[in-house]
Structure formats: C-alpha cells, structure tokens
Image (cartoon, helix red, strand yellow):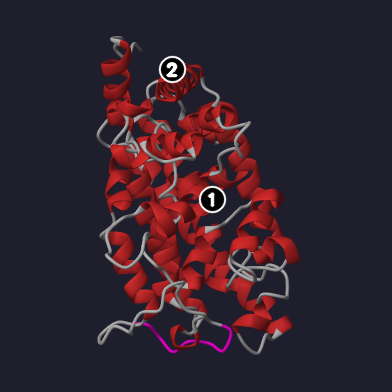
Amino acid sequence: MQLALKCYASDPALSRGRRHAEPPAPTRDAFQRDRDRIVHSTAFRRLVYKTQVFLNHEGDLFRTRLTHSLEVAQLGRSIARALGLNEDLVEAIALAHDLGHTPFGHAGQSALDDCMSDFGGFEHNLQSLRVVDTLERRYPAFDGLNLSFETREGILKHCAPANAQRIDAHEPGGVARRFIERSQPSLEAQLCNLADEIAYNAHDIDDGVRSGLIEVDSLCEVAFFRRFHAETMAEHPQLKGSRVVYEVIRRMLSSQVYDVIEATQSALASTAPPDADAARHQGPLVQFSHTVRSRSAELKQFLFRNLYRHEQVTRTTERAQQVVRELFGIYLERSREMPAYFAQRSDRERAIADYIAGMTDRFAMREHERLTGRQWVE
C-alpha cells in the first residue's frame, strides 16, 4: 500500500493531464491507469525478446529489456516508498523507459542512428516517447496510449537540443521544455534514472559472470565489489560458486538503495521544496552520496572495459549492426516489404526507423534472412 505522499511528491489529482481529454477511471488514479496501459501495450510485450547486453538467442537466463524494466520498477518502488514519492508514477516510468529501444541493444541503436543521420537521427528515449504518443494503435479516438504528462516527461530521460526545440514547437511548455529551461523532471523521474543505473550495474555483473566473460577475481579489482565480497566471505567462508556472486550483488544493491534514500532525504531537508513543481527547480535532488557515486562510476568503467567491449560481445555487436543497416537499406528500396502502416507513410525514413526499432532480436534476424537469404552467423 502506498504510504502518505510527501508535499514534494507528484499528486495524480494535480496531474497536468493527458493530451486528449478522457473521463477519469472509477477505480484508478491517473498514474495507475498509465501503468496499466503500458503493461498491456504491444511494445511492452516485445521487450521480452530485446537485448540488454547478450542477444536473445545466447541464453535463456540472461536479462532482457523486459526483465531489466521489471527490476528498475522494483528498485524504484522500494526507494519511492521510503521517500514518500508516488510509487505508481515511478512504476509507470520504469516500465516504459525502454519501450523505444531497438533490437540488439545499444548496437542496434547506434546503427539506426547512423542510418538516420541525415533525417533527424535516432534517440531511444525519444523513440520511447514516440511509442506511447503515436506508434501504439489501440484506441479508437487517438493514436498512442495518451499517458499523463508526468509519465511522458519521465520517459523522455534525454533529448538533444534540436529535438527538444522541435517537440516544444508542437507541444509548447510540454515534456521537452525542461531541456530548454534546464530544469529537472519530477522527483519520481529522477528516481527512475538512478534505479535504472543501480539495476543495470548489478545485473550486468550477474550476466557477465554467468557468461564466463568476467571472473570474480577480476571484479575484486573494483573497490565496491571487493568490499562486499570480503564481507560475504568473512560471514560465509564455505560459500562457493554462484551463491557468492548473488550475495555480493544483493549487498551492493541494498547499499546503493539505502545510500540513495539517505542522500536524497538530506538534499530534500536542506532545500525543503514546498511542492512537486518547486522541487523541479532545485537541481537534481534524488542522488547518491559522493562516495557511492564515485564507486558506481568505477564499476561502470570496469564493465565497459571488460564486458561491453569484450571481444565476444563486440563480435555479435558488429553482426547486429550489419543486420540493422542492411534492413534499413532494403526498406528504402522496397518499402512494400514493410506492413502497410509503415510502407504508406510519407515520412519514409522515419517510418523505416519506427518499424526497425519495434522489432525484437529474433524477428529482425528472421526478417534479414528472409530478405537477404543469409543466415545469422556467429
């Protein structure tokens, strides 16, 4: 059950509303309704077959975009409850924040951005907003999911200045205005950004060790991991194998969660925002302590060097980028290979990007094989 909201939390009764007016739901507030629409969306279901780090076909137990989003939601809700923030808004943002991710993770995003370099580029955060605003087609009266302003604002985590200006021209004072004014999103959106970071650091350690690409001994070079590994072995000297990693990760997660709660409570006490709008103009308030921020940065650097840039990961990354680029080129020449909704659009390049971005890993591979006659080769 949601505890009483603090004065600086987002109150669904004071929401800035939806782009298309709708009568309120009888049993759910605005943010609960947003969450439910996201869970029932086609884009959300596709996340189960979209890459986090390891491609979908590489193993059944590696994280996907779906399991990552669920982990972010869980961490976010736990922290939100302790801080008196709106848990339902946090959950809605967390579940929707990766809806615009391409197949093949960041590799696919990079390739699609290259393909779109002369046509406005490609940002997965902006694409997530496009999904909930336009590309989901479920309701008779409007395109998209017609989510609340606060949920949409949280989904748009990053936005290039040119895109922010363009969005604001169509939606003056809307979800992109903060990138122009350099203000902050809601505290709930700030919390999702940190929960996202906490989640992927932890599960990438787990998946990296599970894959055999990272050794526990090498992880102990990182001060944050080494601290909790030493604690674990001191308390459980007979512990071996995967249980050691699980216990270290559990302790790391708890430490970061408690640190965010403490550091944020301190920031809120010192700034004392009287309401949610005032909190937006105080600078980032949901935060790590300086010490944990430094430790998290060190861990990310380790993962970048030893996992994301590992030869095996890079090899599949290059293949994935080739698939995306070749699909884009084929659809440019033969748009009828796409479904009619995309093939008949006048904004041809953006339509192709929308179609490819919505693909799962395995659908993109099957479609590439169908159109080129070549199978995925490891």
Asked whether residue 297 is drawn in magenta, I would say no
Above or below — where is 338 with respect to 31?
A: above
Residue 195 is left or right of residue 338, and the answer is right
Q: Which residue type carries mark 2?
A: Arg
Q: What secondary structure is found at the residue carrying circle 1? A: helix
Who is closer to the viewer here, 28 or 23? 23
* Labelled disc at residue 245: none
Asked whether residue 7 is drawn in magenta, I would say yes
Q: Position of residue 60 (x, y in %)?
A: 25, 34
Determine if residue 308 is in view. Answer: yes
Q: Position of residue 5 (x, y in %)?
A: 48, 87
Q: Of label 2 and label 1, which has the lower sequence position?
A: 1
Q: Within the image, what quadrant is residue 344 found in?
A: top left
Count residues near mark 1 (Cα–Cα under 10 Å), then give few for <14, some for 14-19, many for 20+: many
Instruction: State the residue at coordinates (73%, 82%).
Output: 270
- Dominant SS of magenta comes to loop
Residue 74 is left or right of residue 362, and the answer is right
Question: Label 1: which residue?
Answer: 126
**What's drawn in magenta, residue-wise?**
1-8
Above or below — where is 291 with respect to 311?
A: below
Above or below — where is 158 with respect to 226?
A: below
Residue 126 is left or right of residue 301, and the answer is left
* Labelled disc at residue 319: 2
Quadrant where the N terminus sits is bottom left
Q: What secondary structure is found at the residue carrying circle 2? A: helix
Instruction: State the residue at coordinates (38%, 58%).
Output: 95
